[in-house]
Image: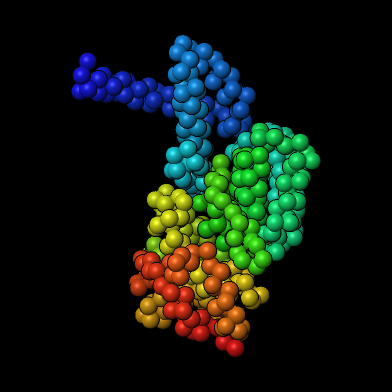
Amino acid sequence: MDLNEAREKIKAVDEEMASLFEKRMEIVRDVAAFKRENGLPVEDPAQEARVIEGRSALIKDPELKPLYVRFLQDTMDVSKTWQRLLSRDGDGVNTLRMDLGGHSCDILVERGCLKRAGELLSLDRKVIIVTDDGVPPEYAATVAAACGEPYTVTVPQGEGSKSLAVYEKILEAMLEAGFDRSGCVCAVGGGVVGDLAGFAAATYMRGVDFYSIPTTLLSQVDSSIGGKTAVDLRGVKNAVGTFWQPEMVLIDPDTLTTLDQREIACGMAEAVKTALIGDEELFRLFEEGKASGDLLPVIKACLAVKKATVEADERDTGVRKTLNFGHTIGHALESVTELHHGECVALGMIPMCAQEVRERLLPVLEGLGLPTEVRADPDEVFRALMYDKKIRDGLITAVFVERPGSCVLRAVRPEELRAGIDLVVKR
């Protein structure tokens, strides 16, 4: 048999499999309807195990069997995604698929989905729930009630919890509770909790499942997706970390009702950042004052930009660096001031915009209640900037916006950013 003949035979098999795939998904539609009507969860680990054991016994070739098991698992994952899509109940629901091959995950945006955590996530096992004392305790309690064996770790609110000491506390809690690799970690909170819990999940016994339930606007529009996890070291943000994609992200806009205006403004800063680098229409909504009502469209627009960016560059070696817009100077400000992360990002964006864009950006930030300058020592801010992990061979890769909706990466000497610091930092 020559190569072309073999390819034709494979094509025929693929066509047959495509027809069978559609038939399978039609049956899954009935399964989804039954589960929805009877309040049953999408996930059923015991049934999946039975299916894998029974179906894999049909494969006689021992070398092919493990590959077939992988094929079955992938097929069931697709079926579960289809079930979740079929379970949508109105305009408040949207499921995005972060397509990263073996690291792919679903991102569900749905009002009230926190209450459905037991249905949507595989929690019938040991689960360490990481939250902070600024998050309404009923959020973690709702997740705990859906777990087979829950353990909740509540850390102090704020960036100070992103430390090796608090990270060790979470690992110790897992070890003392007898967690093995079948357990999982679930973050319920904002960006600090997500980074911290994700890093614990990535490193405990070389990695366990991780679920993210972001409850702040900032984490819902940005930090909860993409797989970056980290803790700070000696005041340097995210100095120790790794990439670890969540199994699923649940974004419930209803949790935003408990946030104060400052926290909403911080989340809006990240949304403005996303608009400037990748969505001109979203930035126009900010200019027109139309982005501060229903936040659901803002969340979805931001997720769409970040999803596409991460899919193109999961490991942050190229285009994903554009998501750092505003963060180069912003992180330095965060290290030496009492401002929140979103406020520092707002300030960090200003010097990185062309003059015309800056003139449009300043009223947007002011309208959202975000600062446009801060009292601090510019020299101290510049020293903090020199710890930026993006510095290579004396150059730092910075993000510049010449017009809303697009951006460019440039390698510059840190000294070239000093004038930008002086623009927003006043003694």
List the single residue furthest toward the bottom: 427
Name the image quarter holding residue 2.
top left
Q: Quadrant of the N terminus?
A: top left
On the question of residue 342 being in view, the answer is: yes
Q: Residue at x 66, y 48 (%)?
A: 200
* Residue 82 placement, left or right of 172: left
Q: Position of residue 152 (x, y in %)?
A: 75, 47
Q: How many marks?
A: 0
Q: Position of residue 70 (x, y in %)?
A: 48, 26
On the question of residue 139 being in view, the answer is: no
Q: Is residue 413 above or below residue 45?
A: below
Q: Residue at x 62, y 50 (%)?
A: 199
Q: Position of residue 53 (x, y in %)?
A: 56, 17
Q: Is residue 147 above or below residue 226?
A: above
In front of the other: 407 or 140:
407
Q: Quadrant of the C terminus?
A: bottom right
The way the protein has been coloured in the rendering is rainbow
In front of the other: 262 or 338:
338
List the single residue furthest toward the front: 393
In front of the other: 384 or 42:
384
List the single residue furthest toward the right: 176
Name the image quarter holding residue 61.
top left
Q: Is residue 134 above or below residue 209?
A: below
In front of the other: 327 or 76:
327
* Residue 76 placement, left or right of 118: left
Q: Position of residue 183 (x, y in %)?
A: 68, 36
* Residue 14 placement, left or right of 143: left
Q: Residue at x 55, y 27 (%)?
A: 34
Q: Residue at x 47, y 30 (%)?
A: 74
